Structure formats: C-alpha cells, structure tokens
Amino acid sequence: MLTFLNLAQLLLYIPLLALAGQGLLFVLAGSRRQSNVFYQLLQLLSKPFTVVVRKMTPARVADQHVPVVTFLLLLIAYAVVSFEKINHCIRIGVHLCQ
C-alpha cells in the first residue's frame, strides 16, 4: 500500500511541477512563451492531464483557464494522497514508513 501511495504522489507531483513551471514562464516570457523550448517541454509533460480536464469541464470554461483548473485539481488530489499516506503510516507505525 505504501508503494502505491508513493507512486501516486510521484505521478501527481510531476505534472504539478510542470504546470507550476508553465505558470512561471507565463509570467517571465509573456507572449513569447509559445516559442520557448522549456515551456513546450513543460506543456508536453502536463498535456495528458490538461486534455482530461478539458473533456471534463464545460465548454464555457476558456481554454486558457484549463491549466489553472488542472493545477488545482492535481493539487487537491496530491493533498488527498498525502493525507492518506500519513494516515497509513500512523496506522502501521511510523518506523515502517521509512
């Protein structure tokens, strides 16, 4: 169970960091961000998650807001997995979670 929770945290952490990096480059690079290689790499890493969120959200949600919604949903999922991991470690004993 601990391995599964660690894997889930890792799979959520990577797109979270990619979306945070995209946000930072959005601020720093401005309108030239689409030609930035690092921005494109971060977009590639987070694209599977943004596509799923785009399909889940209504058409009224603008495409430019989908990465923000994706980030927030991933952040909530990461918090849930982290709390479950803490709960699991408390149940089995903290010394077994090292």
Image: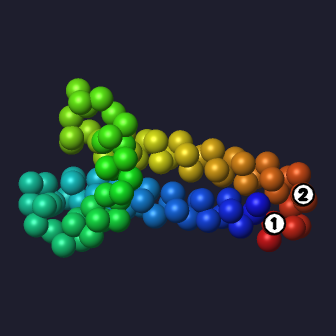
The numbered mark at residue 92 is 2
Q: In the depicted view, which residue is nearer to us: 20 or 77?
A: 77
| Left or right, 27 with reference to 80 | left
The numbered mark at residue 97 is 1
- Residue 96 point in image, percent of width and height: 87, 67
In this rendering, the answer to whether 5 lies above or below 78 is: below
Q: Residues within 10 Å of mark 1 (few under 14, many from 20)?
A: few
Work out how far the residue at label 2 is from the one at label 1, CA to CA, in angstroms. Answer: 8 Å
Q: Amino acid at mark 1?
A: Cys
Classify residue 25 by image quadrant.
bottom left
Q: Amino acid at mark 2?
A: Ile
- Residue 7 point in image, percent of width and height: 62, 65
- Residue displayed at 51% across by 57% down: 12
Screen quadrant of the N terminus: bottom right
**Helix, strand or loop for disc 2:** helix
Q: In the depicted view, which residue is nearer to us: 71 or 63?
A: 63
**Helix, strand or loop for disc 1:** helix
- Residue 94 point in image, percent of width and height: 86, 61
Q: Are marks 2 and 1 in contact (CB under 8 Å)?
A: yes
Classify residue 18 by image quadrant.
bottom left
Residue 68 visible, this angle: no
Classify residue 15 by image quadrant.
bottom left
